[in-house]
């Protein structure tokens, strides 16, 4: 009974993480009204890496060269994922981007197949087909072309898939907290370099910029990351996958509520298809097996 209570608390915590991450799409979209995508990334990752470095400085003092190499690789994927996502958000709606970004979980098995030769199962293949149908419904224009924003978001999903895989590989041999601090630091450095290369205007940090960046850095990055790592110790991977995939749903809801984005049948239909693909890939519909007891479910 005690374990079931911990499992419930963990699931509720992950639900909170999904809400926080989902809200980030609307917050980011609003911030883009006042500054450039690169400037947002510079502020977000610099602040995140500094704060996490201060909080976990004792662990960072033990970091070795191989930790920096692993964290650097993860950080490169993270940077390219966020730069394509943030720039893409200028040219598409936050609600559409939330679901297209979430499609990365469907891509992971196929990228991992290319690396490890582990062939995807039938659920993952069906999920990929559903995912691309959903993206087509959301993104294809009358000329059967994909808009710039949706195309960049699709690229972002690919980089997030590589980011997930690299974390899966390196977190088994390195401290995940140390990897996180390093990856945020690398993303901050790359953002600053891009800012100088493309001569991004480093505008004064006004309230309209500071509030969204603080939210993205502290809530979406540090707090959500911390909750996720603790909560997943007490729940199953299936439960975590289902709950965290709700990020795309909340992303769309917050965009409609706070950004006044229009609800269309096409938007709803495309989002439902992508959400079904995520559930199919991540859970293989195992939760429909009602013959198992709660204790057996939580032992997965």
Image (tube, helix red, strand yellow):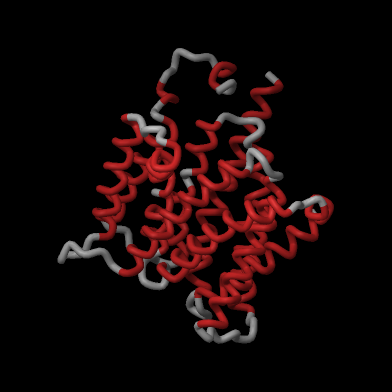
**For residue 111, side relative to residue 216 (left or right):** left
- Above-or-below relation of 294 to 75: above
Count the marks.
0
Name which residue lies at 64% across and 50% down.
Answer: 225
Query: Quarter holding the N terminus?
Result: top right
Name which residue lies at 27% across and 60% down.
Answer: 139
Q: Residue furthest left?
A: 143
Looking at the picture, how far across and down is residue 189, in whole percent? 63, 70
**For residue 143, side relative to residue 7 (left or right):** left
Q: Residue furthest front?
A: 65
**Residue 94 versus residue 81: which sits nearer the camera?**
81
**Residue 190 versus residue 15: which sits nearer the camera?**
190
- Above-or-below relation of 119 to 297: below
- Above-or-below relation of 242 to 5: below
Looking at the picture, how far across and down is residue 293, in whole percent? 53, 14
Looking at the picture, how far across and down is residue 194, in whole percent? 54, 76
Quadrant position of residue 115: top left
**Residue 67 versus residue 247: which sits nearer the camera?**
67
Name which residue lies at 56% across and 18% down.
Answer: 294
Name which residue lies at 56% across and 16% down.
Answer: 296
Query: Quarter holding the C terminus?
Result: top right
- Above-or-below relation of 77 to 172: below
Looking at the picture, how far across and down is residue 162, in whole percent? 48, 50
């Amino acid at each position: 009974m005690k374990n079931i209570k911990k499992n419930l608390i963990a699931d509720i915590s992950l639900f909170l993480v999904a809400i926080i991450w989902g809200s980030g799409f609307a917050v980011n979209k609003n911030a883009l009204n006042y500054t450039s995508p690169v400037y947002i990334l510079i502020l977000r990752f610099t602040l995140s890496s500094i704060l996490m470095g201060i909080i976990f400085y004792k662990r960072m003092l033990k970091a070795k060269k191989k930790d920096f190499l692993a964290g650097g690789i993860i950080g490169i994927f993270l940077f390219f994922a966020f730069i394509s996502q943030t720039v893409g958000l200028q040219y598409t709606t936050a609600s559409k981007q939330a679901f297209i970004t979430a499609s990365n979980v469907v891509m992971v098995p196929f990228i991992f197949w290319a690396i490890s030769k582990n062939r995807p199962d039938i659920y993952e293949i069906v999920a990929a087909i559903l995912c691309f149908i959903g993206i087509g419904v959301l993104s294809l224009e009358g000329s059967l072309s994909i808009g710039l924003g949706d195309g960049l978001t699709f690229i972002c999903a690919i980089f997030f898939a590589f980011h997930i895989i690299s974390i899966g590989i390196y977190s088994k041999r390195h401290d995940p907290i140390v990897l996180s601090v390093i990856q945020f630091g690398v993303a901050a450095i790359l953002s600053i370099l891009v800012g100088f290369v493309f001569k991004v205007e480093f505008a004064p940090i006004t309230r309209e910029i500071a509030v969204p960046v603080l939210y993205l850095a502290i809530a979406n990055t540090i707090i959500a990351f911390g909750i996720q790592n603790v909560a997943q110790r007490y729940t199953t991977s299936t439960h975590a996958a289902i709950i965290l995939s709700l990020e795309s749903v909340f992303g769309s809801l917050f965009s409609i509520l706070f950004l006044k984005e229009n609800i269309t049948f096409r938007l709803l239909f495309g989002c439902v298809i992508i959400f079904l693909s995520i559930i199919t890939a991540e859970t293989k519909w195992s939760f429909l097996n009602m013959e198992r007891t709660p204790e057996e479910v939580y032992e997965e």
